[in-house]
Image (tube, grey):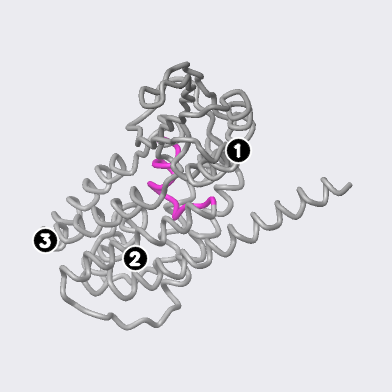
Amino acid sequence: MVYAKTKEKEQWEKHATSLICVLVASLIMSINIKSFVRAGHLIPGGFTGLSLLIQRSANVFLGLTLPYSIINIALNALPAFIGFKIIGKKFTSYSVIMIVLNSFLVDLIPVTPITYDPLLVSVFGGILNGIAIVIALHGKASSGGTDFIAVYLSNKLKKPSWNFVFGINVVILLTAGLLFGFEEAMYSIIFQFVSTQIIERFHQRDQKVTLFIVTNEPDHLEQELMNFTHHGVTHIEGKGCYLKENKAMLYTVVGADEVKDVIHLVKKLDPKVFINVVKSEGVTGRFYQEPIE
């Protein structure tokens, strides 16, 4: 009974964290669109950028004023449906909440642009956009559209794929360049590049790290490691050349977001342990990754 209550409490805490992250991310993204993106006439890539491109094209070429919310929600309907099928119901549900919130907040928030300098708009707008997406991803959600593609590929390939999505966004931006001029499109590419680098740097779930753990207590450590991380561990026998003592090296690969907790656990079990942390470019083969719900 106590265990059931603990699990229920954990689920509610996760749910609350996701909703808070979605709300904060939606607010930041909406303010960014009103204060930076529109001030520089940028097309930020993804379905957000596509929505702004359609909205602007309708205004310029047809004289129609279309609400951003309707365009963005309509464009994201199909990716959301696919997300339910192949990514995860909870992840997609939180993403849909963010899409709807962001769509209406853009139309409702009365924000005045901070600057009209195109370079400042591109750089700082890109930073804010990247931060918003990182917060959403931390809350097990996304801003929709091409983010669904990035998350799906990252889980499938077991490595970050945001730079691949950046390439897709460049195509959208070049289309915008043909319609409205390449100067704005080039600034938009800077915006998207900065945003992508922020995501690559701070969203660590898709990054892998190799740990080389030299210890005198391998049997106890390896079992605890496997229980804690659900990752495999390879035990290699060796000899310390300085003290001429027999040693064991445990080799394992974990997610970058797990490193801090794993090191804390290992040091707690063996205070004399030596750990070498190496960034992994990618892994091939079976690697446990917590599934997206």
- Please state the horizontal and vertical placement of residue 261, each as a whole percent of the image: 54, 45
Is residue 247 one of those drawn in magenta? no
Q: Quadrant of the C terminus?
A: top right
Between circles 1 and 2, the one closer to the viewer is: 1
**Disc 2, SS:** helix
- Dot 2 corresponds to which residue? 128
Q: Which residues are magenta?
A: 140-153
Residue at image position (44%, 35%) is 274
Residue at image position (36%, 53%) is 47
Q: Amino acid at mark 3?
A: Gly
> In which image quadrant can residue 211 be found?
top left
> In which image quadrant can residue 109 be found?
bottom left
- Distance from Cα at disc 1 to Cα at disc 2: 41 Å
Q: Residues within 10 Å of mark 3 (few under 14, many from 20)?
A: few
Q: Observer-nearest residue: 134 or 115?
A: 134
- Please state the horizontal and vertical placement of residue 219, each as a whole percent of the image: 61, 23
9 left or right, relative to 293: right
Between circles 1 and 3, the one closer to the viewer is: 1
- Dot 3 corresponds to which residue? 181
Tell which residue pokes out farthest to the right in this image: 1
- Distance from Cα at disc 3 to Cα at disc 2: 24 Å
> In which image quadrant can residue 191 be found?
bottom left
- Please state the horizontal and vertical placement of residue 35, each as a whole percent of the image: 31, 76
Q: Residues within 10 Å of mark 1 (few under 14, many from 20)?
A: some
Residue 7 drawn above or below residue 236: below
| Numbered label attached to residue 269 | 1
Residue at image position (22%, 79%) is 115
Is residue 144 one of those drawn in magenta? yes
Among numbered discs 1 and 2, the one appearing first in the sequence = 2
